[in-house]
Amino acid sequence: MPRENAGPVWAVVGATGAVGREVLGLLSGRGFPPGRVRALASERSAGRRLPFGEASVGVAALGPGAFEGCAVAVLCADASTARAHAPEALGAGTLVVDNSSAFRMDERVPLVVPEVNGQVLDGPDGPRLVANPNCTTIILVTALEPLRRAFGLEAVDVATYQAVSGAGLGGIAELHAQSRPGRRAGSPPPRVFHEPCAFNVFSHDSPVDAATGVNGEERKVIDETRRIWSDPGLRVTPTCLRVPVVRAHTEAITVTLAAPAGEREVREALAGARGLRLLDDRSANAFPTPLKATGAEDVLVGRVRPDPGEGPDEAGRYRRWCLLACGDQLRKGAALNAIQIAERLARAPV
Amino acid sequence: MPRENAGPVWAVVGATGAVGREVLGLLSGRGFPPGRVRALASERSAGRRLPFGEASVGVAALGPGAFEGCAVAVLCADASTARAHAPEALGAGTLVVDNSSAFRMDERVPLVVPEVNGQVLDGPDGPRLVANPNCTTIILVTALEPLRRAFGLEAVDVATYQAVSGAGLGGIAELHAQSRPGRRAGSPPPRVFHEPCAFNVFSHDSPVDAATGVNGEERKVIDETRRIWSDPGLRVTPTCLRVPVVRAHTEAITVTLAAPAGEREVREALAGARGLRLLDDRSANAFPTPLKATGAEDVLVGRVRPDPGEGPDEAGRYRRWCLLACGDQLRKGAALNAIQIAERLARAPV
């Protein structure tokens, strides 16, 4: 039931993209009235209408005065668009949450996952521009935060199984087109990705650093994880791959705790944590999957077990733990986290 | 061009299954004459004909006298069939290579990857029964053997992206059926697997040990890797998941070397190794994928890089290295490795 149209206006920049549409969907799902949404995009998309629950909203061009009267702007565009338009929004008195990588490593801009370091948003002199982390990072730190709080972390090894939605709506269309029966593997030829995505697995599509061999996605996971946890020396070892999944990421994590922990303590820490749901039924072989995480707001965790290569200490505790996390890349990995930041920043729950 | 039909006869048990068909395909591809193949299967399949290159071979039932006159039997059936029929084949004077898990941890039966420990097959008193390791293990040890020889290994962390072919032809059919456009996710309902396999990732379908949380596939990787390398204390930490890929496995590996190594040494070791192909072009983002590994005899390795979380020593060397390996689960992971064992055992290259 939409509420009244009086109240603060939220701008959604890049509204026609995968993350922008998800922000609209989450807002409408929470009863946010369409009259308080300003959907913004490039000139090319101006005049289109986008679904907003049962209603729809018109798309306006991102031109002069676009942020006038907006309390909040959620930027769901690329880094260059963010750099070009964030100052304008801030100048109009608008609070800005940016989904791109533009400001993530800018020391003046907080990088926030509310369950982890949301307190930086509070207080009378809170920030007016906040960066939303990379999707893989959000899912990783959300899953591990309860273990970090309870036992401390010494190292994180993570292999990712990333959905094609991270490359936008074009990635999803490419996966579906290549999945049609009777198609030869890799047909039609890839355009969004550098490899066929259907029935395949490939190293993440971000550029690979010639000197280190680390790709852009892995670099983000390392740098952003350290920054969010204020732990610049943390050993983070990611391998980021894409898999033929539409929109939720899976992460196979092995974490080395600073203090050893027993199985019950580890499970209790995870089970009681905000933003997580523990799904771990060994007898039924029921654990998190990206299909189960699709559309969910929580990150799913499971397959929780001590590293079988490590023996327990005299108290039956272990330092190294393995677990699996799945999170909707477009929700907690992007749109939902941004909305959670914006709500807390604006002191106004949607 | 098939060669003459005189010469030793090879029996292929479980010839109608995914691995059995692959053995037939590899034999015919090498010019093995169809008249020297005895395709065996259960009573139910007797009388069927299976493709053998341009020709075909008839399927006989696995009954009394089935192995009479066979020099070699490649068993491509389940563990109970192997236990029931291996003694009979051995009694008929037949050399046996078993693909199942029946004998893999039997101290009297060698567990062999020819590139790694093939020497146990040689000599006048060589074994008459040899176990073929699990597919994930074969790909892992083949990829790491050159590093083990050059630098020694201290620990292996591996996350797998396993193809559905590991569950046989039924797994492949299920993936294709669920991938049809317009199908709801997970439709038709899974029967071979416990989760939908199309557009999904899930924890391996082997049972999960209630006490340790380790599943059957992971246990095989741990135990078989230690056994093949005669290194019972090696720390092996696997996470085994399935992905929507038809027939080649991908493994994201982080290995801790016993002695630190520089990048050039590591690459040289991998590039010169038997059974491997290094595919590692950072500027083109071209690395191993399961589609590239499909049908290949070599295991593909790439994304070779030092752990970005570890600093180099004073000589620029690292202890921890990350790499990606892809191998055709039905070829090097099963049929090809078994044929390589059989050839060496019989002193008769196919």
Image (cartoon, coloured by chain):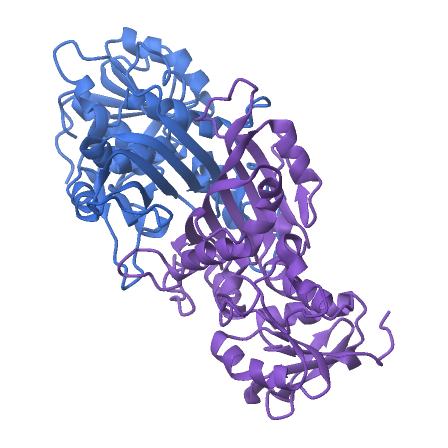
Chain colours: A purple, B blue
Q: Residue A16: x, y in percent?
A: 60, 77
Which residue is nearer to you in this view: B172 or B114? B114
Q: Position of residue B19 (x, y in %)?
A: 36, 33
Q: Position of residue A143 (x, y in %)?
A: 59, 46
Name of the residue lying farthest toward the top:
B91
Q: Nearer the viewer, residue B270 or B73?
A: B270
Residue at the image point whose x is 35% and y is 64% from the top: A207
Residue B126 is at least partly visible in this image: yes
Is residue A103 rendered to the left or right of residue B95? right
With A218 as the anchor, is B215 left or right in this view?
right
Relative to residue B110, is residue A124 drawn left or right? right
x and y percent of residue B88 in the render?
Answer: 33, 9
- Quadrant location of the C terminus of chain B in the rendered image: top left
Q: Residue at x 80, y 75 (%)?
A: A33
Which quarter of the picture shows residue B281?
bottom left
Is A66 displayed left or right of A207 in the figure? right
Q: Quadrant of the N terminus of chain B?
A: top left
Q: Quadrant of residue A341?
A: bottom right
Q: Nearer the viewer, residue B31 or B103?
A: B103
The quarter holding residue B152 reads top left
Considering every residue shown, the one lying at the far bottom of the view is A64
